[in-house]
Amino acid sequence: MTRPDNPVLIVNPRSGGGKAIRFDLVAQCRARGIEPIVFEPGADLSALAAAAVRNGADALGMAGGDGSQAAVAAVAAEHDLPFVCVPAGTRSHFAFDLGIDRRDVVRSLDAFADGVERRIDLGRVNGRVFVNNVAMGFYGAVVQSPEYRDHKIRTMIERLPTLIGSNAEPFDLRFRGPRGGAHRGAALLLVSNNRYDVEPRPGRGTRGALQSGMLGVLALAGPPPSGRLEWSAPTFRVESATTVLAGIDGESVEIEPPLEFESVPQSLRVRVAARPSRRRPVPVQARPAKRRSARPVDQD
């Protein structure tokens, strides 16, 4: 696999409770000849990635959570560039399904120089790319809570009775099920980039190879077990009379209906480190970076 001449990694130093800082990712990038760009509050992540491409980047990576991964992956896919996922988020579900060791954050940088490349699918809803899933219904409402990011489980438990209890207002989510039947509400509606496996095989993550060219759809549209629907489809549509509260790769979003979902088959060239590394992180002064670590970024 050809090593990129001008690899760039965008780093969110606040993601995952400061993982990028703890692993000194900026210095580790410089030691490997990778240009680090630090994502600052208020910056436009997609614009940073697009500017890096205009300035000559021939491979893009993101060190951050799954929502950030999706934003940079979308730019990489648009320009057909290799993409490297560095698991610096809190849970890094996308990295897990790519087969990346989430405990060895620094090792993932090896993908730039010594990576195995393959093409995987992306998901898209109303033009926005997602790498994992879009959740609507009670999860979409919970993720809107300011307390959710710091106390996910507690916030979910506290809000569930008002969201899906006997006195709760039904969620206006209208869609057609696997056999074409119309459904007018669901406590939970989850659309994923490839279908989640009920019993994932060891070493394959929760969604297999991410190359099926299909969305996974999971709906809780009535009492279990008959109210649980699960199927795959290349496209999916959700209608509603109101703005839909959703969690896209764990990030709170409000989407105007209708919601048009589609799989974008094998649109992303993803690179993963070729083999486990038994060496320690590169000393940060071991060798100089090929280029300056922070050139001016064009902002439109």
Image (cartoon, helix red, strand yellow):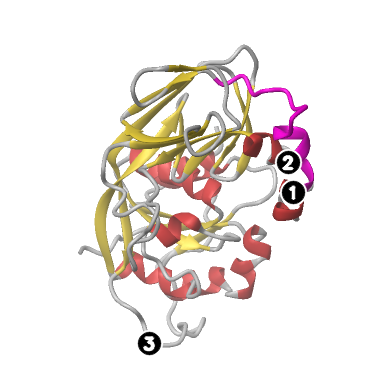
Residue 96 place in picture, x, y as percent: 43, 61
- Relative to 28, say whether 99 is above or below: above
Residue 121, by quadrant, is top left
Q: Is residue 289 magenta?
A: no
Label 3 belongs to which residue? 278
Residue toward you, 180 or 193: 180
Residue type indicated by callout 1: Ile
Residue toward you, 48 or 223: 223
Residue toward you, 35 or 296: 35
Element assignment for label 1: helix
**Residue at x 63% of width, y 33% of height:** 253
Element assignment for label 3: loop
Residue 188, by quadrant, is top right
Residue 150 place in picture, x, y as percent: 75, 55
Residue type indicated by callout 3: Arg
Q: What number is the disc on residue 160?
A: 2
Whether residue 112 sits left or right of residue 293 in the image: it is left
Label 1 belongs to which residue? 157
**Does the CB distance between marks 1 and 2 fall below 8 Å?**
yes
Range covered by the magenta-colored residues:
158-173
Residue type indicated by callout 2: Leu
Label 2: few (<14), some (14–19) or many (≥20) C-alpha neighbours in 10 Å? some
- Relative to 104, say whether 56 is above or below: above
Whether residue 148 sits left or right of residue 263 in the image: it is right
